[in-house]
Image: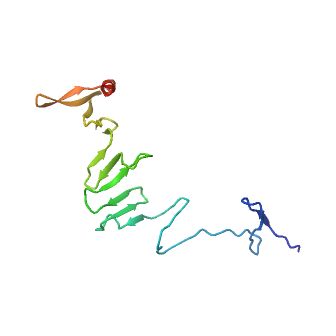
């Protein structure tokens, strides 16, 4: 039988390199890297990380650990901080180091601009005004003579007042 060797061209420098084959002539492929154990030091991954189980950083949040983050395979994120008033979630604009929105462990939240919930049916403007809908009409809460009154407040009117 004639000796035949399989080669390939390296796309980086156009050099010819041998291709590994087994005794049957099948290509030998690199096995995926598998690791089970502890790693001491930093780890940098340039590709995606896939896990069929939980991913934890620090202690497990559902125990008495002081700190911890857990990503569950079902899609839930659990976070525990030492004090209930500590920020547990923060959202940062692309070019800022200041969060535009954050939630604390005690359930309170802060927003740098308007905040709405339930499909903009109720919320607060950046100025702290309460806005809400009732029977398809948009209102804002105003104080008048020591009472809280509902004043009709259209988006157009809010835009006009914002220009002043």
Identify which residue, 100 or 96, lies in the foreground: 96
Is residue 117 visible to us here?
no
Indicate the position of residue 26 as horizontal and vertical percent values: 74, 69
Q: How is the image coloured?
A: rainbow
Taking 113 as reference, is 49 above or below it? Answer: below
Identify which residue, 124 or 40, lies in the foreground: 40
Horizontal side, residue 146 vs residue 66: left or right: left
Assign the N terminus to one quadrant of the image. Answer: bottom right
Q: How many marks?
A: 0
When asked about the image quadrant of residue 85, the answer is bottom left
Taking 73 as reference, is 29 above or below it? Answer: below
Task: Return the residue found at the far left.
Answer: 146
Horizontal side, residue 139 vs residue 19: left or right: left
Indicate the position of residue 124 as horizontal and vertical percent values: 27, 37
Is residue 129 visible to us here?
yes
Horizontal side, residue 107 vs residue 90: left or right: left
Indicate the position of residue 105 as horizontal and vertical percent values: 28, 56
Taking 61 as reference, is 110 above or below it? Answer: above
Residue drawn where x is 25% and y is 37% of the image: 128
Residue drawn where x is 71% and y is 59% of the image: 12
Residue drawn where x is 41% and y is 60% of the image: 72
Identify which residue, 118 or 153, lies in the foreground: 153
Indicate the position of residue 79 as horizontal and vertical percent values: 34, 59
When asked about the image quadrant of residue 16, the answer is bottom right
Horizontal side, residue 147 vs residue 91: left or right: left
Taking 3 as reference, is 105 above or below it? Answer: above
Assign the C terminus to one quadrant of the image. Answer: top left
């Amino acid at each position: 039988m004639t000796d035949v060797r399989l080669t390939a061209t390296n796309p980086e420098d156009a050099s010819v390199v041998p291709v590994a084959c087994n005794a049957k002539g099948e290509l030998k492929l690199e096995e995926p890297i598998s690791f089970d154990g502890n790693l001491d030091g930093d780890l940098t991954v340039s590709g995606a990380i896939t896990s069929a189980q939980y991913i934890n950083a620090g202690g497990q949040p559902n125990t008495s650990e002081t700190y911890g983050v857990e990503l569950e395979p079902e899609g839930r994120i659990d976070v525990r901080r030492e004090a209930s008033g500590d920020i547990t979630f923060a959202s940062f604009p692309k070019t800022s180091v200041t969060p535009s929105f954050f939630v604390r462990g005690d359930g309170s939240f802060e927003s740098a601009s308007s905040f709405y919930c339930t499909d903009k049916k109720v919320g607060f403007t950046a100025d702290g005004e309460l806005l809400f809908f009732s029977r398809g009409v948009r209102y804002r809460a105003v104080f008048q003579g020591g009472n809280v009154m509902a004043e009709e407040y259209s988006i157009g009117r809010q835009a006009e007042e914002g220009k002043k």
